Image (spheres, rainbow, N blue to C red):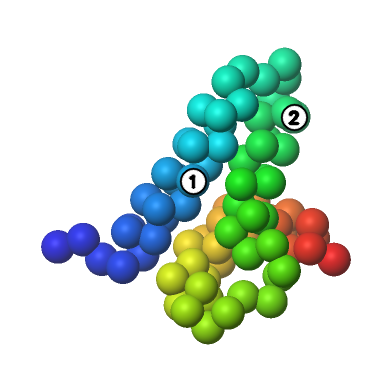
Amino acid sequence: MINELQITIESINARIRRAVNARGHFPNEQAALKCVYLAIMSLDPTGKGRKRWSNRWKKALNAFEITFDGRLSAGRK
């Protein structure tokens, strides 16, 4: 059985893949990371997160926050 977190992560991955494919190629690693960062930040552009949005994405974004050692929340300040 596929759990809710796995579905959410796959949805985020699809959005990241879409952003990367739209860009095509990257001159360096920094440019690729910026594209991924912007794709993740565009999930909630206001930073406030509606309740429905929060229910769908919060677990996955918390996992990214741990993985990327606070860099996602630092970009919102």
Of the 4 image quadrants, the one containing the C terminus is bottom right
- Quadrant of res 64: bottom right
Q: Secondary structure at mark 1?
A: helix
Q: Mark 2 or mark 1, which has the lower sequence index?
A: 1
Residue 32 horizontal/vertical position (percent): 66, 30
Would you say residue 43 is visible in this rendering?
A: yes
Viewer-closest of 10 and 49? 49
Q: Is residue 68 left or right of residue 58?
A: right
In percent of the image, x 62 and y 75: which residue is there?
Answer: 49
In percent of the image, x 52 and y 42: which residue is there?
Answer: 16
- Farthest residue toward the bottom? 51
For disc 2, the marked residue is 30
Viewer-closest of 45 and 77? 45
Mark 2 Cα-neighbour bin, 10 Å: few <14, some 14–19, many ≥20: few
Q: Which mark is residue 15?
A: 1
Q: Is residue 6 left or right of residue 26?
A: left
Residue 63 horizontal/vertical position (percent): 52, 61
Mark 1 is on which residue type? Arg
Q: Measure the alpha-carbon separation of dots 2 and 1.
A: 19 Å
Q: Is residue 13 above or below residue 35?
A: below
In percent of the image, x 74 and y 29: which residue is there?
Answer: 30
